[in-house]
Amino acid sequence: MSGNEFGLLNVKKYQFTTPYVYEVSSHWGIDISEYMNSKTCAESKKKLVELCKIMGSYLEKGDFFELYSCWIGEEAEKRDGEITLQINNFDIDEIKIPEKTLVRFEK
């Protein structure tokens, strides 16, 4: 088992409430916080809006998906926070999603 597969198993075991885990990776994860530089924060907001559009097209009313961003190797560590948002009803400029925060997006 590769380190990446082990990380996905740890996220599934320690963070998510569903049995399905998909890795969405880019140069930087989704981190929307005051600790992030403005360029990366703006990129994170754009990624999150696009992810919600994509996932919203698959989900039925009452369904949800979860998002968790952390550094490789931190998948089993205690999370720092947890929030729930409505997938199509949040102000991207008003939310804060720092790393190691589980976000549940409900439709």
Image (spheres, rainbow, N blue to C red):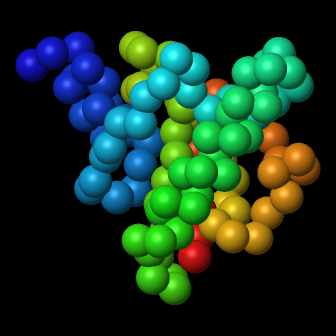
- Please give the name of the residue rendered at 59% of the width and 51% of the height, measured from the top-left corner: 50
- Please give the name of the residue rendered at 42% of the width and 15% of the height, measured from the top-left corner: 72
Quarter-of-image position of residue 34: top right
- Please give the name of the residue rendered at 58% of the width and 58% of the height, measured from the top-left corner: 52
Quarter-of-image position of residue 33: top right
Query: Count of labels shown?
Result: 0
Q: Is residue 17 above or below residue 57?
A: above
Estimate the x, y position of residue 66 in percent, counting from the top left: 49, 53
Residue 79 visible here: yes
Residue 81 visible here: no
Q: Is residue 85 above or below residue 67?
A: below
Q: Quadrant of the C terminus?
A: bottom right
Foreground: 100 or 48? 48
Estimate the x, y position of residue 9 in percent, counting from the top left: 25, 34
Q: Is residue 32 above or below residue 40?
A: below
Foreground: 85 or 89? 89
Q: Quadrant of the N terminus?
A: top left
Foreground: 70 or 76? 70
Estimate the x, y position of residue 80 in percent, counting from the top left: 66, 32
Q: Is residue 7 above or below residue 2?
A: below
- Please give the name of the residue rendered at 88% of the width and 47% of the height, measured from the top-left corner: 93
